[in-house]
Image (cartoon, rainbow, N blue to C red):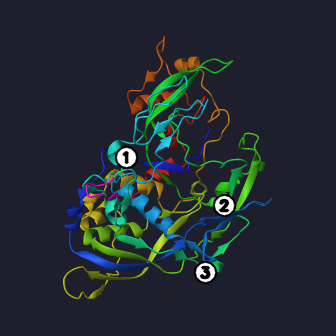
Amino acid sequence: MSHYPNPFDFVPFPSAPIIRTEGEFDALGEKFSGYLELEIRALMPVHVVGQAEDSTERKSFFFRQSGLPCIPASSIRGCLRAFTEALTAGWVSRANPEYPKRYRGRHVGFKTFEDYLPDSGSRRRISLPAVDKSFKPAASSNRLDVASYLFGTVVEGEQTEDGEKSRKSKIWVEDAYLPLEAITFDKDFWAPDIEGEAFMGGAKPSVSNWWYFEPAEIWKRNLRGTAPVAEFIGEYLRGRKFYYHQDPMKCVQNYDQKKGRWDYHKNRFHRVRLECISPDNRTLPFRIYLDGVPQPLLLLLMSILLPGEHIRHKLGYAKAYGYGSIEFNLKSAKMRTVGLGIPNAIELREEPLGNLDMESLTKNGLADFIDKNALIWLARILGWPHEDLLFMYPQYRNHEFKQPINCKQFEQMANIKKPASYPMKIISTEQASNIAKALWGLKRPIDFRLYQERANGWNTIMQRKP
């Protein structure tokens, strides 16, 4: 049976972050201050959460400030920073520090950057940090990643020798306001929800599967009144999560309760109507101000904002369903060199910088700042145009997430020599993939990577280039 690929994918972590001292960044070249004036164009409907109306017909209004709809600066900064951190092998600046084990829950808890041991319970397992500690932002270090140098950083619980625990940003972003006619409650703009909790797509990583995590072990789990089942335990997070572009109107119809394709756990299904920026509408011009940015990093920022024909950004809510695809358009720019005397204002060159590819990045002296593998994966995930591909979560039903795997079935189908000892260590990615392949006819979403590679349209995704 064919299936759609999962709507998010991972940019793998490199072996270590790329970091430099502030002095090394400062010495990269002539510094520039000034502003870039841009607009944001909606390629697909875009929804930034504002006020939700709790009524029979559930609605989520677009974010407003002083009564006017706008994309807040924090959303724009978050979009640009997340992309920059992935592209430049940066720190992981935004991560929940801990996902604790629920009381009487079966899932294994973990912490992002520290070892984790639950206080009680029969399933006491020390979980290693889900992300290598070298990716944790450190105020006490004299080194910075590119994103922290540009966007600044605040590190909780740490401070430098001189008492500081934050670094000033060199980039300030304005809110991007919208004309009222740019947003609407179109009847086709909606997202699925179920009563009591977010429907799906929230950050719910669990060590007790190989979905978010690299495969590590297989446990034998005893269920009351049934035979023991195999549980697939992971160790390290697969990477930084980004969402694919797709047509939201086509996507959400496949989640519709009337189609009978989804098990909603007996909870009531809702359509939440979304007030969105309609496709092809644009924000009013807004500015990104820069203060003393070295020329190579100014060129990098421009390449991220204007990545050429093959990559587009996403921001806002319901990205898993196709909402939030945008592009930045440069309207004007004024820069001045930072130095002694009275500087002259200069116009930024207007010709294109080139695509966000290694040839253009190397030409602009940026190759040393880039994680080449991350660039490849960003182009695959955020590739544009979306080519009418659909991306959907695996369903909660038999042969998908709902399906338990009896230990004896696992041993027989995976050709495990008896007696199998548990926990069973996974020694390689290939071994994990072979196990998932052997169990494919029983349960498909075991190993995330295999699930994606066997999905409809995966060959098209793999051919995408930056």
Question: Which residue is at the far front?
Answer: 163
Q: What residue does disc 1 label?
A: 13
Q: Which dot marks residue 179?
A: 3
Rendering coords of residue 131 (x, y %): 39, 42
Rendering coords of residue 180 (x, y %): 64, 79
Disc 1 residue type?
A: Phe
Disc 2 residue type?
A: Met
CA separation, marks 1 and 3?
40 Å
CA separation, marks 2 and 3?
23 Å
Pick the front one: 421 or 386? 421
Crowding at mark 2 (Cα within 10 Å: few <14, some 14-19, many 20+): some
Task: Indicate which disc, 1 or 3, sits on the residue closer to the N terminus.
Answer: 1
Pick the front one: 5 or 155? 155
Disc 3 residue type?
A: Pro
The answer to whether marks 2 and 1 mark residues whose Cβ atoms lie closer than 8 Å is no
Q: Quadrant of the C terminus?
A: bottom left
Q: Which residues are magenta?
A: 159-165
Mark 3: which secondary structure? loop
- Determine whether 344 is above or below 147 in the image: below
Question: Which residue is at the far top?
Answer: 419
Asked which quadrant contains residue 261, the reply is: top right
Q: What residue does disc 2 label?
A: 249
Asked which quadrant contains residue 354, the reply is: bottom left
Is residue 57 among the parts visible in the rendering? yes
